[in-house]
Image (cartoon, helix red, strand yellow):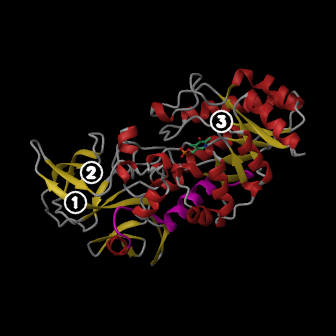
Amino acid sequence: MDHFDYRDGALHAEDVPLAEIAAAVGTPCYVYSCATLERHFRVMDEALAGMPHVVCFAVKALSNVAVLRFLARLGAGMDVVSEGELRRALAAGVPGAKIVFAGVGKTGAEMAAALQAGVGQFNVESEPELERLSEVAVSMGAQAPVAVRVNPDVDAKTHAKISTGKAEDKFGVPISRAPEVYARAAALPGIRVVGVDVHIGSQLTALEPFEQAFSRVAALVGALREAGHDIARIDVGGGLGVPYVRSNEAPPLPFDYGAVVRRTVGGLGAEIVVEPGRLIAANAGVLLASVIYRKRGEARDFLILDAAMNDLIRPAMYDAHHDIVAVREPEAGAAILPADIVGPVCESGDAFAKARPMPPLAAGELVAIRSAGAYGAVMSSEYNTRPLVPEVLVSKDRFDVVRRRPTYAEMIERERIPDWLG
Ligand SMILES: *Cc1c(COP(=O)(O)O)cnc(C)c1O
């Protein structure tokens, strides 16, 4: 459920007409709804009720500091994958202890920054990383709290680019080798073992892969405890899919996901960490755009938008489906005809939808690309020297620009012509 609805024929974000935001900020821009973010956070939090747990929002899904601050005030921790994301979480006021630092290629400098910030957990993905982290911690007179990310070798049955839990994926250590890796961790002076971590992929639309993975982790926890390791925390990762409105996917409900967590690892007396990104953010955001031209094509019309693949890359990168709706509600009985909805970038892949049934839309009219809150703005670029898309946060009847559009001067000023070029 989200808070983007038609009222009096106009699409609103909560109590704010999207047309009002477009007039004030210009298009394209991202618009996020606080009420929707909060609803999704609480649904996940409640799904884990009765178990000691912390919901760490996966910052990589939507990293705007205002959004992070809003979620932190609800009680969220943060899952970060780089020093940049760590700095964002700290800037949003998240205490280090509620930050989990993940990622397969942490550098020594990033480790030092995270130790300095007192992060609560490093998710370590290899033995070389473990050795490095120990060295960095010892040099700072510290000990790093560590969960080893295990790869349970299950097929998440999701898009190949976002599957992470099969043996051939680059993530984690094979679960069969985990006991030796933990033995090594326990012997290192800069490492303190605190838990186990697993994350098998993103946009999962079935519970069985979670069930399999978490069952394997539960068995491992038993073995690790017998070997004398203190496993106080079990981090089950993120990855629960969301319904991309009107696509055919019907992902499981958070409540049922919570039940899987409960019956697999919930009874082990450990604190449960979850790292949802998409679940909280995807349907809490839209990309608001204007139609620049309606162009007649051979087979069907093209709607050329002022938003492009550099602003939202999911359709080009993952063949992702996004519902696209007119901001002015179509009249009952309006002719619905298939159209190709594309951006202005010079690549054929710059398309948001092919042969999509759409109401008649003229140049200048507004559309909202839905389910764009996660992996939207964070993956945007300045390709074609298009300014980074601004972000707007809505709460009830107010809206605020939480990232402004850069000027062309700012974009070009970052570059230098060397002296020898005169
Ligand atoms: C990407 C990622 C997440 C979040 O995944 P979602 O599908 O957005 O929930 C959580 N944990 C790790 C380690 C990740 O890489």
Circle 2 SS class: loop
The numbered disc on residue 105 is: 3
Front residue of 31/152: it is 31
Q: Nearer the viewer, residue 61 or 419?
A: 419
- Classify 38 as above or below 417: below
Q: Earlier in the sequence, mark 3 or mark 2?
A: 3
Quadrant of image for the N terminus: bottom left
Q: First in sequence: mark 1 or mark 2?
A: 1
- The location of residue 260, given as percent across then percent down, is 62, 40
Disc 1 to disc 2, C-alpha distance: 9 Å
Q: Are marks 3 and 2 in contact (CB under 8 Å)?
A: no
For the question of whether residue 30 can be seen, the reply is: no
Amino acid at the residue labelled 1: Ile
Secondary structure type for disc 3: loop
Q: Which residue is rendered at x = 75% and y = 25% of the image? A: 178
| Mark 1 element type | strand
In the image, residue 234 lies at what x, y percent? 73, 41
Q: Which residues are magenta?
A: 25-53
> From the Cβ of disc 3, is ligand 1 less than 8 Å away?
no
- Crowd rating for badge 2 (residues with CA inside 10 Å; few <14, some 14–19, many 20+): some
Give the residue type that dot 3 points to: Gly
Q: Do the residues under discs 1 and 2 have CB atoms within 8 angstroms?
A: yes
Q: Quadrant of ligand 1?
A: top right
Q: Residue at x 60, y 61 (%)?
A: 68
Whether the magenta-drawn stretch holds residue 18 is answered as no
In the picture of the structure, the residue carrying the numbered disc 1 is 292
Disc 3 packing (10 Å; few <14; some 14–19; many ≥20): few
The residues tagged by marks 1 and 3 sit, at their Cα atoms, a distance apart of 42 Å
> Residue 250 versus residue 202: which sits nearer the camera?
202
- Mark 1 Cα within 10 Å, few/some/many (few <14, many 20+)? some
Tag 2 residue: 344
Query: Where is residue 80 shown, x and y percent of the image?
Result: 64, 48
